[in-house]
Image: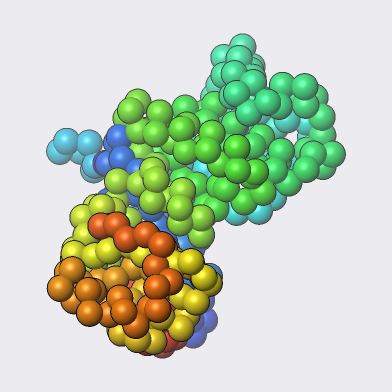
């Protein structure tokens, strides 16, 4: 188990992390969610040992044994193009980073090629990274992280540059890794993907964890009983002004937080615009917007 215990980090006057604690278990996908500047990437760098905290520690817990990670326990994909050397080919990058981990070319190359094959990049094996599109670079870096076969996978915005088909493929891969008892820490603004794959989510804002829990339980706990509404016209922003229990999920999609007796008297005010009503809770994106928006002092769409 990976355990982050009350980690603090400061950059000058800026408190980037304020006593953050998290756990990540084998066979679990944890989504770490927050706005830009919330401290997500800083926390990942501390876990990897690239930054040192002012206070707190990062530990690997194995039964009674506790020790600091050495780095080889992790596979990592950082945001942007900072993962591989641009002037080297995909294969050269894989053999170089595999060698750092003590993996011979004989063992590393087939692992890497298997993942490239899955991502449809085998024909680019000898291509310099600089010649590839951003999406291809992202896939190549992800293939390398997976080929290292770490105990824990740390992914910072892994869907950047990926097309919808590749995003779906990534979701299937992550769920497969979970079944193999990998631990995955996922930070992303692609909240639909996080909602699809995560077992737990933690919301971070201004360097502090606001809420943390099992994904489905957290949504149900926050929302309680609710209904989803699909409108015939894109008038959702007007409708949310009728009652604070309405939440906006799209121009023509709403969630009502409450029971049927609370919703029923409001329906006539919608002037027949409702095409569909079904039981349901808000999406993770809606929870994120309301929870983090209120913490930052930004009004939620329905307030």
Pick the front one: 290 or 256? 256
Q: Is residue 256 left or right of residue 254?
A: left
Tell me if residue 153 can be seen. Answer: yes
Tell me the residue at 57%/14% (across/down): 107
Q: Is residue 239 left or right of residue 11?
A: left
Tell me the residue at 22%/79% (across/down): 265
Tell me the residue at 37%/59% (across/down): 276
Counting from the top left corner in percent of width and height, residue 239 is at: 41, 80
Q: Is residue 115 left or right of residue 86?
A: left
Q: Which residue, as the protein is rendered here, is positioned at the far top?
A: 106
Pick the front one: 292 or 74? 292
Task: Locate residue 60: give its quadrant.
Answer: top left
Counting from the top left corner in percent of width and height, residue 274 is at: 39, 67
For the N terminus, which image quadrant?
top left
For the C terminus, which image quadrant?
bottom left
Q: Is residue 142 above or below residue 176?
A: below
Q: Count every numbered label the image shows and give the total.
A: 0
Pick the front one: 83 or 219? 219
Tell me the residue at 73%/30% (across/down): 90
Q: Is residue 91 above or below residue 9?
A: above
Counting from the top left corner in percent of width and height, residue 7 is at: 34, 65
Tell me if residue 16 can be seen. Answer: no
Counting from the top left corner in percent of width and height, residue 184 is at: 39, 42
Q: Is residue 28 above or below residue 82?
A: above
Task: Locate residue 33: give its quadrant.
Answer: bottom left
């Amino acid at each position: 188990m990976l355990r982050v215990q009350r980690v603090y980090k400061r950059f000058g006057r800026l408190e980037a992390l304020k006593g953050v604690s998290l756990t990540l278990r084998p066979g679990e996908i944890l989504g770490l969610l927050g706005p830009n500047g919330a401290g997500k990437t800083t926390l990942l760098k501390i876990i990897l040992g690239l930054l040192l905290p002012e206070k707190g520690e990062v530990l690997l817990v194995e039964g009674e044994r506790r020790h600091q990670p050495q780095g080889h326990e992790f596979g990592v994909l950082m945001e942007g193009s900072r993962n591989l050397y641009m002037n080297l080919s995909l294969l050269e990058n894989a053999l170089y980073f595999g060698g750092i981990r003590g993996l011979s070319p004989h063992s590393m190359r087939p692992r890497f090629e298997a993942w490239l094959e899955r991502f449809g990049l085998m024909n680019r094996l000898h291509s310099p990274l600089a010649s590839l599109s951003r999406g291809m670079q992202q896939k190549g870096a992800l293939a390398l992280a997976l080929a290292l076969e770490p105990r824990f996978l740390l992914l910072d915005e892994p869907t950047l540059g990926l097309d919808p088909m590749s995003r779906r493929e990534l979701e299937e891969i992550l769920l497969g890794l979970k079944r193999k008892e990998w631990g995955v820490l996922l930070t992303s603004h692609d909240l639909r993907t996080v909602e699809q794959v995560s077992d737990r989510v933690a919301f971070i804002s201004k360097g502090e964890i606001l809420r943390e829990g099992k994904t489905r339980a957290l949504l149900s706990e926050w929302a309680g009983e609710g209904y989803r509404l699909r409108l015939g016209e894109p008038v959702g922003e007007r409708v949310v002004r009728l009652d604070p229990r309405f939440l906006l999920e799209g121009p023509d999609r709403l969630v009502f937080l409450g029971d049927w007796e609370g919703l029923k008297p409001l329906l006539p005010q919608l002037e027949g615009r409702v095409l569909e009503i079904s039981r349901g809770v808000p999406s993770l994106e809606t929870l994120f917007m309301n929870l983090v928006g209120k913490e930052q002092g930004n009004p939620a769409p329905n307030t």
